[in-house]
Structure formats: C-alpha cells, structure tokens
Amino acid sequence: MFFPSQSFGEAVWRPAADVYRRPDGWLLKFDLAGVSPGDVVISVEGRRVTVRGVRRDNVLDECCTCYRMEITYSEFERTVDLPCVVENAHWEIEFNNGMLLVRLHGGGAL
Amino acid sequence: MSESQTLQTLPVLPLKNTALFPFLMTPLSVGRPASLAAVEAALATEKKELVVVAQRDPNVEEPTQDDLYTVGTKAIVRKMSRPSDELMELLVLGVERVVIVRLEHTEPYLTAKIQPLPLPTDTGTEVEALQRAIVELAGKAISLAQPQAPPELARMLASSEDPLRLVFLLASMFSLDLAKEQKLLECESRVDALRLMHQYLSYEVQVLELRTKIASEARSEMSKEQREYLLRQQMRAIQQELGERNPEQAEVDLLRERLEKADLPEDVRKEVERELGRLERLPAAAPDFHVIRSYIELVLELPWRVSTQDNLDIANARQVLDEDHYDLKEVKERILEFLGVMKMNPSAKAPILCFVGPPGVGKTSLGQSIARAIGRKFERMSLGGLHDEAELRGHRRTYVGAMPGRLIQAVRRAGSNNPVIMLDEVDKLGRDYRGDPASALLEILDPEQNKSFRDNYLDLPFSLANVFFITTANTLDSIPGPLLDRMEILRLAGYTEEEKIQIARRYLIPRQLKEAGLSDEQLSITDEALKKIIGGYTREAGLRRLERAIARIARKTALKFAEGHGEPVVIRPEDLVEMLGPQPFMPEDARKTLPPGVATGLAWTETGGDVLYLEATLLPDGKGLTLTGQLGEVMQESAKAAQSYVWSHADELGIDLKLFRDAGVHLHVPAGATPKDGPSAGVTAVVALASMYTKQPVRSDTAMTGEITLSGLVLPIGGVKEKVLAARRAGIRRVILPKANEKDLRDVPEEARNEMQFIFAERIEDVIVNTIPALAERLAAPAQTA
C-alpha cells in the first residue's frame, strides 16, 4: 500500500568510501569519478575526516538530451569517523583512475 | 538588491493529485510534453533543479498560474530514466519549500520565479506531545495495514527528529488527498501540521481496525464451512478404512438383498432390477434418488404373492357373525353362501358387496366381522368427499411428491393380496374438474378388469381380483348407475324397538359398562327405561344416539360410585330425567284428532322412516294450488295430480264444484325446512284434499302411503319396512299400503306385523273409504282388510 519508495534524502550526496589501516597511519579511498581535483576540499577534525566538493556534469555543453541519469551530480559531502584522533596527522591526496585517495601519516594512537 | 538577484527562475513540473514534500525522495512519472520539456531543461543545468507544484484541478492538461497552488517544493532530480519519448521516470528529492512568485514562460515549458519559504521551527510541549502521539498512531496504523512491514520503518519514524520530516513522510506514505497534503506543505507552524496529521491518523486507525475486524469475521465464517467439508471428507475416509461403504451404497445393497429374498413375479422383478440400476448410478444428492428408493420400497413391500388362508369353517363364521351383530339375517346368509362357494371352488371370485342403510346400523362393524369370520386382513378407507381420482389411482411418478393411490396403500398395509377392503360412504364421492373418482372405482370394482389394476405410481399391473370389496352407503340415489351395477346391494334397514332393546342388552350396555369400569351388578337398566330412551330420547334408525345415552348413564353412575355410593343402581323410566335431562321427543306425536284437510303420510328418509302430515286449506276468493314445505318437483306434480283427481271426482265425493272455481288451495307439508320429494305422498294428498273440500275429518289412527294415477290407481312405493316402523314408533297402528307392496311386509319384523293392521289398496277409493269414515257410505266400494 504505502511501502516507502519514498525515503529521506539529503540535499548533498554521499560518495562511497573505503578505509584501510596502514602501519604508519590510514588510507581512505573515495569513489569520486568525474570530480576534478580542484573541486574537492578535505578537512580533518578530531577523529573525523570530511570530504566536500562538487561533481559537475561536463557534457552539458554538447546540446544533448538526457535519456537516463543514474550518476549523481552537484554537491557532495562525506564524513568518515576513524578509531583515533587524526587531527595532527600529516596528509596527502592523490587522484587515481577516478578514485580519490587520502593518506594520513602518523597522527596519534588508537 | 533587485528582484532578479534574489529570485531564482526554475522550470516548473506540475503534479496531479499529489504534492511533493521537502526532505523526501519521491518517484514521479512524467508524460505531458510540457513537463518532459521542463525536466529536460532542468537536467541540462548543473544543479538539475526544478520546482514541483501541485495542480488545483487534476483534469487540467495545460495549467496556467491560476491552476497551480502558490506553494511548491524546489527539487533536485536524482535519477532519471526514459523508457520512451513520451514517458520519464524520475526520482526527485525535495529540498526546499518555495513560493511561486510568478510564472515567467509557458512555452515550451513553464518556468517560474520562486522565493524560498522556510519551514516553521516553532517548538514547545505541544509539538513534542503531538509528535510522540503521531509516532504511536503511525506504528499502530502500519501494523494494522501491513503486519509484515519491516520494523525499520517504525524505527525510522521514531528516530525522525524534525517533526515536519515525520509529518511529510507519513503524509506521503498514507496517500492523503491532495488538499490535505497541500495544507501540510503550506503550514505556518509545526503545531498546525502535527494536529492535522494526528487527526487524520486517528481516523485512519479506526477505519483500519474496523477493516481488520470485518476481515477476521469473514475469515471465521469461511473456515466453518471448510471445517465441515473437511470433517465430511474425514468421515468418508474413516468409513473406507473400516470397510464400510457410504450410506447410499449401503442402502442400495440393502434393497438388492431384499429384492433377492422377495417373492416377485418375473416382470416385476425385472422392473425393480432396472430401477435399482438407475439408483446405483445416481448421486445421493440427486432429487430422483429418494423418489426411486421409495418406489422400490413400495414394490418390494407389496404382497404380490402373499395371501392369507381363508378360514372356511362355516360354523365358526356363523358364530363370529352372530357374536358381533344381532339379526341382519339376510346379510349373514349372503356371507355364509360366499364361504360355501369358496369351499367348493377355491378360485371363485370374491364378491363386491354394498351395504345400504341409515347411519348407525352397523355397516362398518359388519365389514370388520366379516373379515374376522373368514380370517382375512381388514382395511377401511372413507371415500366421503373424495374428489380426486388420483387419490384412488395414484399420481404418476414424474410429479413431485407423487404417492401410490389409496387402494395400493391399503393393500400394502394389509400385507396380503386378499384383504377385506371396505370403501365407506361410496354415495358421498365428490366429483369436479379434477376428475371423477366414481369412474375410477368402476375399474377397481369390476372383477373382469381389476385382475390387472394399474396404479399410476406403481405403473405395474397388480391384481385386486382376490380382494373382498365391501362398500357402504346411506342411499343409492347418488351412486352412478354403472357403479351400482357392479355391486351386490344388501340393505340394512333400521331396527325395531325390540331389536334395539336386544342389541342394547347384548352389545351396547356391556360395552359401555366396561368403558365406565362398572360391573353389571352395579348398574342395570330396566326394559321400560330402555324403551323410553329409544322412543323419547333417541329417534333414529340406527343405534348411535342410543349408545351415547347409555354411555351417559354409565358415566353418571360411575361418578356416583366414585363419590362413595355403595348401592347398585337400577335405572327406571322416572330416573331418566335426572340422567339425560328432559325428554326431547314426545312419543309421537301422533295427533289425537285431525281437523278436516289434514292427513297422515309416511316418508322414507336416509335415517329411516318418518311420519308427516299433509295440511290442506281452502283459500276463499283465492286461485290455483299453492304448495309449500320444500317440496321437490315430483312431489309437486303428485299434489297437482291429486287435486285433479279430486276435482274430477267431485260429484262422487259430494263436493260443490263452485268451491274449485271460487277458492284457491294451499297445501303445506311440515316440517317446512326439510326438503321432501317423491311420489309416495299421492294418496295422502288426495285424502287431505277430499277431507278439506268435504269438511269431513280423516281418521287420526291411520297412516297411508302410495303413488296415484289420474285414473285413481294406487301404485307401489319403496321403503315399506322403514315407513311401517316409523308409523309404529309414532304410535299409529293402522297403515294403508299399495296392494302391490303386500309382499314387502315380510321384511317387517314379526312383532311389528302382529301388532299392526295393514290395509292394501288398489284404488284411491279404497283409501278414502278407510280413512274418511263420513265418505265411506258414499263410496260403497269394497275394501280389503289384511
């Protein structure tokens, strides 16, 4: 009768994320294909790592008509909570085949 | 800031029948060309935003600003697929409540300038309370409507912190109508929205509860039937397990067993075999099943070859008949003759007798004693008022509720094919459009035809040839000739006073004493008292009233003994007033003197004979002949003939002819209410008229009867015995009869004959001479005296 095909949704979308433990820190992987590195902002606060940004639809200029849309565009935001405080860690990012890799070095004990 | 900076312009997606709420991901179908274009436009932007707003009227295809609500929702298209050019499936996410400030374009799709309308954020205890109540109600509603709903749903509802998010989710889940949805969307405070939702949910829960109740009732109803069906199936299975057959089959087997044992003629057996075969193939529920079963049962029960052995011991038979009935010599002789013939020729046909006589003379009980005397079964049926031929001959089996006729039923009850069957009241057979039972009786009572009597129901020939038929009737007049012709008539006339006393002494008093529980020492009735009962309390040819009167005396006596009376009771004539009340009939009634113009006649009635008086009177200055007293046609003609005779013989009788010219005559026969007919009052009318014209009275001690002719002959009449006995009852001892009836006197009991004087007349003159003394000398005709 009314089983919710409806559900709550957020105005921003959440990309999928993988988290790995490394001997000297953490590796976070975000599924952010089609997002240009300039559109991504990363912030680290306490045990929390947040990735914000925007995925732009880059074929809009080609005057096409859309017949199927499953990829989510516009602003996204993803927060990952880690088991330990990483606020003071040193971190670097890398785009690899559509994946955003965030490496955290050091940064406190568990 | 200018307007264009603050206001966003977006494509508009109008919705029919529903509103889109913020926070919710909602699937939508888009089919209208303008809407398709609007979505295409939205998808061609980076943000994929549009405004979703509901139409006021879902039937409008191309809405303008007036057709749309002003409050809508800004939404992001999250997913889209387009299976064909004409249809889009969208998943949109409501993000913000907005007001449509105005529509910008309508072609090729609607666009609108919108202004955000932030959702209210009021808080307070009422909000809190309403929110909790709604969560509870919603849980209830969901469990009622969809018991299998995943528990996460309820959890999701409970965990929703923003009350408006909760309201919006519930609104879209329960598919509220558009007006309500729109109201929720436009709400100015959370409290308003929560109240509205609470109200709706309470109602919804009630409806759902009722629905559940109805459904569960229907389910229990259904399961009762299923249970019975199941039990029946189980019973069948158990029967099979036990080696029992189902009841219908068992019944058929039983019938077959009976058929094998039954002694049936070959053609009957074949017919039953055939019907049994049909029965086996029928399901028990078929309406024919029971019809065929009862038919087979009837055929098997009929005594096709069963007959009782006649007891042909004539001495024994005579004894039995004498035990049961006093006198009735003629009838007894006839029965004994039949037994004699049976003894000599066992294949002789049984006679068909018809007992005719007044009520209460013992016709029916005589039939019973005949059966007892010869040792046959006795079956009796009354034909009085029977007007449907099918009663006798049965209905064809094709009719619903068909039954065999009464004759076949009687034979079945008797259980032998040679019973005595008594057909009572054969003179009272009805006859109407439904058929003529008398004609059906013709076949039944004809020894040539009833050898193969065919009942409509039985539809097999059954022989009634050995049945001893006895019919009874009060009168022969209403029996059709052909039927009468087939029967041997035996008359049981009324009893005389002496006979009645004998019968009372031998049968009635002992029987009534036994009924009342008295011994013959306790109650005795003197002959004088019996005579008074017979003459003064019961005037009848038969014995019923006499027996009732005796029964009454016996009851009253029994009461005395029951109250402690010890002395034996002897009933004398003077006790009767106390026992039976005042005497209803005066000992007749024979008028002591008769004025001129009155003569005593005799009549035969169904209840025996009667005395009646013909009264004639002269009507000076009147005309013609007036006849009253319910006289039938024959009697009227007879009276006219009598007047003509007197007129034509006026000279001889010494009557002034002027009287005939100047005066009318009125002839009346009381009692006025009783219909009378027949020619036998002819002589009485002549005497009455002669007496009237001559002013000479008639002898009051003489009664007369006889038919007359114009030439003055006296012709014979019927019912001599009854008439003579009636005269005797009335106290008349001198009776004039037609000469030709002299032979009938032998029917009259001897004591009556001895007591009375009979005069046999050949001509009218003989009658006048013997009744009007004053005219005797004028007519010096010789009279014969018995």
Image: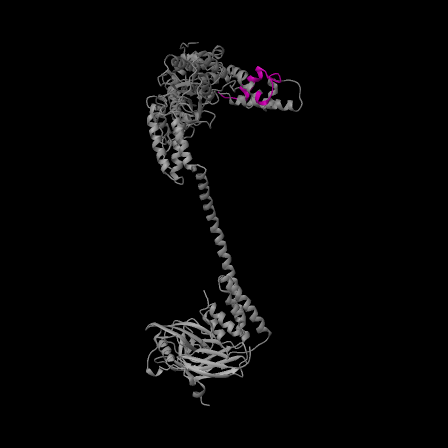
Residue B275, image x, y percentages: 35, 33
Total numbered circles: 0
Q: Is residue B464 visible?
A: yes
Q: Is residue B308 above or below residue A35?
A: above
Quadrant (top left/top right/bottom left/bottom right) for the C terminus of chain B: top left
- Type of colouring: one colour
Q: Is residue B597 visible?
A: no
Residue B522: within the magenta?
yes
| Nearer to me, B670 or B282 | B282
| Nearer to me, B659 or B628 | B628
> Residue B747 lies in what quarter of the image?
top left
> Residue B58 lies in what quarter of the image?
bottom left
Residue B69, image x, y percentages: 44, 77
Residue B245: within the magenta?
no
> Residue B638 lies in what quarter of the image?
top left
Q: Is residue A92 above or below residue B269?
A: below
Residue B385, image x, y percentages: 42, 30
Residue B245, image x, y percentages: 42, 37
| Nearer to me, B229 or B82 | B82
Q: Is residue B72 above or below residue B415?
A: below
Q: Is residue B382 above or below residue B211?
A: above
Please, which residue is most extreme toward the bottom here?
B1
Please, which residue is most extreme toward the front here?
A23
Q: Which residues are magenta?
A: B514-541
